[in-house]
Image: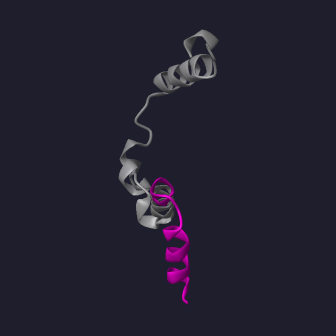
Amino acid sequence: MDLRQQIAQQVDKLPVDMQEQVLRFVASLSPSAAVGESGARLRRFASSLDPVSAHEMTQAIEEECERVDASDW
């Protein structure tokens, strides 16, 4: 029995919801599953922020993004 047959045999023994979980997992392993833009396409945005705006964004991230509001959950 080859590897594909062994995998199919094991998956066949699982309940449908777990088979769906296996399918999602296997799909996530595929290199084609990666989504996004290539670095070459994003290069045109390099240095598009002036230093003042970049500093303001960095400051806002540091001040706001690391806070946890326990009553917000």
Residue closest to the eye, 71 or 5: 5
3 shown above or below 33: below
Quadrant hosting residue 32? bottom left
68 shown above or below 33: above
Residue plotted at (55% across, 90% down)? 1
Residue closest to the eye, 14 or 31: 14
In which quadrant of the rendered image does the C terminus lie?
top right
Instruction: Tell me where the magenta segment starts and ends, as one range.
Output: 1-19
Q: Looking at the image, how many numbered discs can be counted on the residues?
A: 0
| Residue placed furthest toward the bottom | 1
| Residue placed furthest toward the top | 71
Task: Please state if 35 lies on the left or on the right of 59 as rendered.
Answer: left
Task: Please state if 36 lies on the left or on the right of 59 as rendered.
Answer: left
Residue plotted at (51% across, 19% down)? 56
Residue closest to the eye, 67 or 44: 67
Please name the colour scheme applied to the rendered image.
one colour
Q: Is residue 12 magenta?
A: yes
Pinpoint residue 3: horizontal percent, then vertical percent.
55, 83
Give the main secondary structure of the magenta stretch. Answer: helix
Residue closest to the eye, 52 or 10: 10
Pinpoint residue 52: horizontal percent, then vertical percent.
49, 21
10 shown above or below 5: above
45 shown above or below 14: above
Residue plotted at (58% across, 22% down)? 65
Pinpoint residue 39: horizontal percent, then vertical percent.
43, 54
Quadrant hosting residue 45? top left
